[in-house]
């Protein structure tokens, strides 16, 4: 399977939205009441918010495509994680989502490498990542890239509060 990675543009908002909704639902769909999940997906992952993110000059998104069809993506932008040491030029890895059908092939690592090349050129910037406290696979993945836990916060979906770890790669 030869998958391609490319930078996304605002014209890709619908594709990014579809991947975000599908992967979030695959992974966390059973974790929340249906009405809370649908409201969260609409507010955060519908085409409008994705287009705004893609148009933001502080953001960068990479698409993973299989025969021209989006099957994953990585989104980064200005850090919004609540931590006292966060700086104005720091970058947050906001989402790294790959459809279940394409997981396990090293595609997440390929997206991460593309992102890190952008992040560290020409300056090495501080990377922040929020990850669910019970997502041990993601925690191990980010640790391979030098990310360590430096805090926690609540991730809110409707009435649900999930404990998230704040990771940082200095």
Image: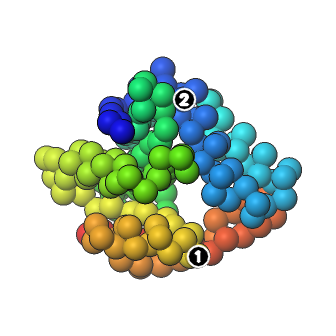
The residue at 61%/34% (across/down) is 18
Answer with mark 2 or mark 1, whichever residue precedes in sequence: 2
Residue that numbered label 1 is attached to: 134
Q: Quadrant of residue 90?
A: bottom left
Q: In terms of depth relative to the viewer, which is nearer, 43 or 139? A: 139
Residue 66, position as x, y percentages in the image: 42, 32
Give how far across and how far down residue 76 sits, in percent: 40, 47
| Horizontal arrangement in the rendering, residue 127 relative to residue 11 (left or right) | left
Say whether marks 2 and 1 touch (CB < 8 Å): no
Q: Residue at x 13, y 47 (%)?
A: 122
Q: Which residue is tagged 2?
A: 15
x 51%, y 67%: residue:
131
Q: Is residue 165 above or below residue 30?
A: below
Secondary structure of the residue carrying tag 2 is helix
Which quadrant does the N terminus fall into?
Answer: top left
Q: Is residue 82 among what the camera can see?
A: no
- Identify the residue at horizontal 72%, vertical 40% (top origin): 42
Scheme by which the image is coloured: rainbow
**Residue 145: image location, x then y, percent:** 28, 67
In the rendered structure, the answer to whether residue 123 lies left or right of residue 41 reads left
């Amino acid at each position: 399977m030869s998958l391609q990675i490319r930078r996304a543009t605002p014209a890709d908002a619908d594709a990014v939205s579809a991947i975000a909704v599908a992967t979030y639902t695959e992974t966390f769909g059973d974790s929340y009441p249906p009405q809370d999940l649908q409201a969260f997906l609409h507010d955060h992952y519908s085409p409008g918010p994705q287009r705004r993110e893609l148009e933001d000059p502080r953001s960068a998104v990479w698409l993973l495509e299989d025969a021209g069809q989006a099957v994953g993506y990585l989104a980064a932008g200005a850090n919004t994680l609540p931590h006292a040491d966060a700086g104005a030029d720091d970058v947050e890895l906001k989402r790294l989502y790959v459809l279940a059908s394409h997981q396990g092939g090293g595609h997440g690592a390929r997206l991460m490498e593309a992102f890190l090349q952008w992040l560290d050129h020409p300056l090495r910037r501080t990377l922040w990542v929020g990850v669910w406290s019970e997502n041990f696979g993601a925690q191990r993945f980010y640790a391979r890239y030098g990310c360590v836990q430096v805090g926690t916060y609540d991730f809110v979906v409707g009435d649900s509060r999930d404990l998230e770890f704040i990771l940082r790669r200095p």
